[in-house]
Amino acid sequence: MPRDPLSASNGAPHQSGRRARSALPLRLAVPVEEVLTLRIALGRDRVGTVPTRFRYEPQRPYEVLVTFHLGRPDEVDWVFSRELLRDGLRGLTGQGDVRLWPAHCPCHGATLHLALESPYGSALLEASAARVRDWLERTYLEVPEGAEPDCGPTDAQLAELLLADD
């Protein structure tokens, strides 16, 4: 798959004067991906499918990237918080562009509904709640809840890496 356009640094300015973060050992960041086929409402009585990739980058610990492969050269990416996805598996959450809620489908069992709005249109999608939950649990194994601020290297670790090349 092509490299995600959103995987580059977020460009956030360095914040000095913050209290020191706990020193976690440096390790290679491992993205967590899952490709799922979501069902999409195409009309009142029509349903289609969309291959969709869920991606979590530990370097961007608060967000998830959901890429919809629509059979065109351009893909449609949506970025929203990992917490929003977690909460959507439990109950109605979100506002504005992204809303999520659990449901039960007689044919597919426990599902997660995603309602997306943009200036270009809207979509109502349905995913297997179990598959999304399994993927989400893998992201929490990579970066536990509450450990997000500690994902990057500390200033001391960065200095050590820079001085090691001399």
Image (cartoon, grey):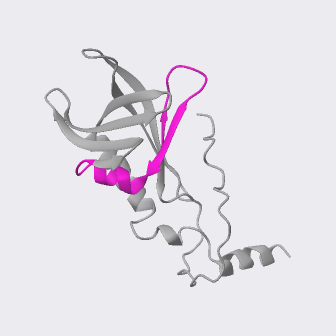
Looking at the picture, tell me which residue is in the foreground, 1 or 83: 83
**Residue 33 drawn at (x, y percent):** 47, 44
**Residue at x 45%, y 63% (from the top left corner):** 143
65, above or below 126, in the image: below
- Residue 38 in the image: state x and y as whole percent: 35, 30
Left or right of residue 8, residue 62 in this image:
left
Residue at 49% across / 23% down in the picture?
70
Where residue 68 sits in the image (x, y, percent)?
47, 31
Depth check, front residue: 56 or 47: 47
Q: Is residue 97 left or right of residue 102?
A: right
Q: Quadrant of the C terminus?
A: bottom right
Quarter of the view holding residue 11? bottom right
Q: Count the numbered circles shown.
A: 0
Left/right of residue 89 with respect to residue 38 in the rendered view: left
Closer-to-camera residue (94/91): 94
Q: Residue at x 39, y 60 (%)?
A: 140
Which image quarter: residue 34?
top left
Q: For the magenta stretch, what is the residue range?
A: 65-92
Q: Quadrant of the N terminus?
A: top right
91 left or right of 31 in image: left
